[in-house]
């Protein structure tokens, strides 16, 4: 082994031994090898938001208050200090540290995604609370491969939900604001998920997690007959998920590279305060998702579709005289026209429907419903290197307001304009 002159000199006067220097050098080489393929990436997102309600009331009492990541707490107890409307905002800082898997049969790696800032507040709080922190772990998993067939890739730890056309990361979404479909999807899971590529065009994924509820290491509980939080025991209420992705082959001509996706997640959810004894479906929530992105004969134009349905959203709830469940549906269409290398025009249209089924278990209840539409247009012009810069306008309208998951804080009256909001947004994201 070759040593540098400084090490040889220290060995000559007895300060170090060449054997210990060799061991230290070997250990340092192992550390350097382990870190050599580590990548660091992420982004910083900032925005200016302005939302108005044509009915004359404040945005807190309009659909704008419920848009994901725009007003996390604005509709719960009047804590509007986290609202992003009518001002300048730091949205979030994301830092990703990862070692991707190589192509070897027994490859391994890891992924860690950290969030800092307002969008991290309330994002998947840990099981013991602390949701007011401006720091969150979005993902943290070990990636493994087992050489079975074409190879099975595993994620073990905390990972994103396999459902959804959009994601938490606005940097990869076609629009700055998120859809209503995004609002009813699970966010992350603590568990294990396996992905297998059947053929080059078709991949399948199956997984199991602690629960469908948000939060790292969150557990599902069975509550006692008194519904007392102190009267509970851990139950084997796990969440199960499966998905399939199909990518069209090159032989499909202009449609080559298009993708179709379908998935389902089933598990216990206590997001609405329901418990698992005496509640409809024992607090279980089911999410169905189907989506597609299609290339078109016009090379610059890409279109997409997304369908979300959640049965018993949040696990249901109860009053002293009966039970209720929330069912929600969202269907959206997307279009992106890439006019130049720097200029893109993005559009989204969405229909959303939610219903509250009161006294469901007693077969004597009634159903309250709410439906609405939203239209979003986004102009993206990436003038600076590594920077996404966007201007966006969004219109939301609720046809009714009867207490479902999309509401305007119970202030709409007879279909008035109070169920309408218009938002203007400017967003810049630096990706590194």
Image (spheres, grey):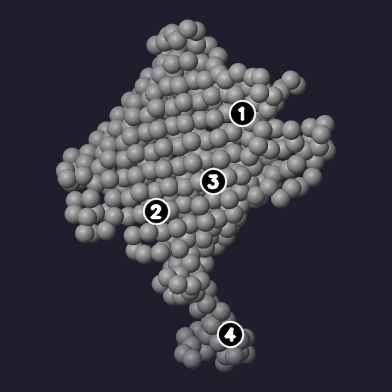
Badge 1 density bin: few <14, some 14–19, many ≥20, Cα 10 Å:
many
Cα gap from disc 4 to disc 1, whole angstroms: 64 Å
Asked if the residues shown at circle 1 and circle 2 are in contact, with their CB atoms under 8 angstroms apart, the answer is no
Asked if the residues shown at circle 2 and circle 3 are in contact, with their CB atoms under 8 angstroms apart, the answer is no
96 is higher (above) or lower (below) than 316:
below
**Mark closer to the observer (4, 1):** 1
Badge 4 density bin: few <14, some 14–19, many ≥20, Cα 10 Å:
few
Left or right of residue 431, residue 76 in this image: right
Q: Secondary structure at mark 2?
A: strand
Cα gap from disc 2 to disc 4, whole angstroms: 48 Å
**Label 4: which residue?**
23
- Give the camera-side residue of 405 and 281: 281
Q: Secondary structure at mark 3?
A: strand
**Label 3: which residue?**
265
* Residue shown at the point (40%, 64%) measured from the top left: 198
Q: Position of residue 205 (x, y in %)?
A: 48, 57
Left or right of residue 422, residue 207 in this image: right
Q: Position of residue 58 (x, y in %)?
A: 48, 13
The residue furthest front is 363
Cα gap from disc 1 to disc 2, whole angstroms: 31 Å
């Amino acid at each position: 082994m070759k040593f540098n002159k400084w090490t040889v000199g220290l060995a000559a006067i007895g300060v170090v031994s060449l054997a210990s220097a060799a061991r230290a050098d070997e250990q340092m080489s192992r550390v350097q090898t382990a870190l050599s393929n580590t990548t660091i990436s992420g982004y910083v997102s900032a925005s200016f938001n302005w939302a108005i309600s044509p009915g004359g009331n404040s945005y807190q009492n309009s659909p704008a208050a419920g848009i994901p990541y725009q007003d996390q707490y604005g509709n719960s107890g009047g804590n509007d200090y986290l609202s992003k409307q009518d001002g300048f905002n730091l949205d979030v800082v994301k830092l990703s540290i990862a070692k991707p898997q190589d192509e070897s049969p027994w490859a391994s790696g890891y992924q860690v995604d950290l969030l800092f800032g307002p969008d991290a507040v309330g994002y998947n709080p840990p099981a013991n609370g602390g949701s007011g922190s401006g720091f969150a772990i979005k993902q943290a998993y070990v990636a493994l491969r087992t050489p079975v067939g074409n190879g099975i890739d595993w994620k073990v730890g905390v990972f994103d939900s396999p459902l959804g056309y959009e994601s938490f990361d606005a940097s990869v979404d076609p629009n700055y604001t998120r859809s209503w479909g995004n609002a009813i999807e699970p966010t992350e899971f603590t568990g294990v998920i396996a992905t297998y590529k059947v053929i080059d065009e078709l991949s399948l994924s199956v997984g199991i997690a602690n629960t469908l509820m948000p939060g790292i290491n969150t557990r599902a509980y069975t509550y006692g007959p008194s519904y007392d939080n102190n009267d509970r025991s851990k139950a084997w209420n796990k969440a199960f998920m499966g998905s399939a992705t199909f990518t069209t082959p090159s032989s499909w001509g202009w449609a080559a590279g298009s993708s179709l996706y379908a998935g389902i997640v089933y598990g216990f959810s206590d997001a609405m305060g329901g418990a698992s004894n005496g509640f409809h479906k024992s607090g279980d929530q089911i999410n169905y998702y189907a989506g597609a992105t299609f290339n078109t004969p016009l090379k610059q134009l890409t279109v997409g579709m997304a369908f979300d349905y959640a049965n018993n959203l949040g696990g249901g709830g109860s009053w002293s005289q009966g039970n209720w469940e929330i069912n929600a549906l969202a269907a959206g269409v997307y279009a992106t026209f890439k006019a130049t290398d720097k200029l893109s025009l993005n559009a989204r249209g969405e229909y959303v429907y939610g219903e509250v089924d009161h006294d469901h278990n007693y077969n004597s209840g009634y159903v309250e419903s709410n439906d609405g539409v939203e239209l979003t247009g986004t102009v993206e012009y990436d003038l600076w290197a590594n920077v996404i810069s966007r201007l966006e306008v969004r219109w939301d309208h609720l046809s009714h307001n009867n207490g479902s998951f999309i509401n305007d804080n119970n202030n709409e009256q007879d279909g008035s304009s109070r169920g309408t909001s218009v938002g203007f947004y400017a967003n810049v994201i630096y990706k590194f």
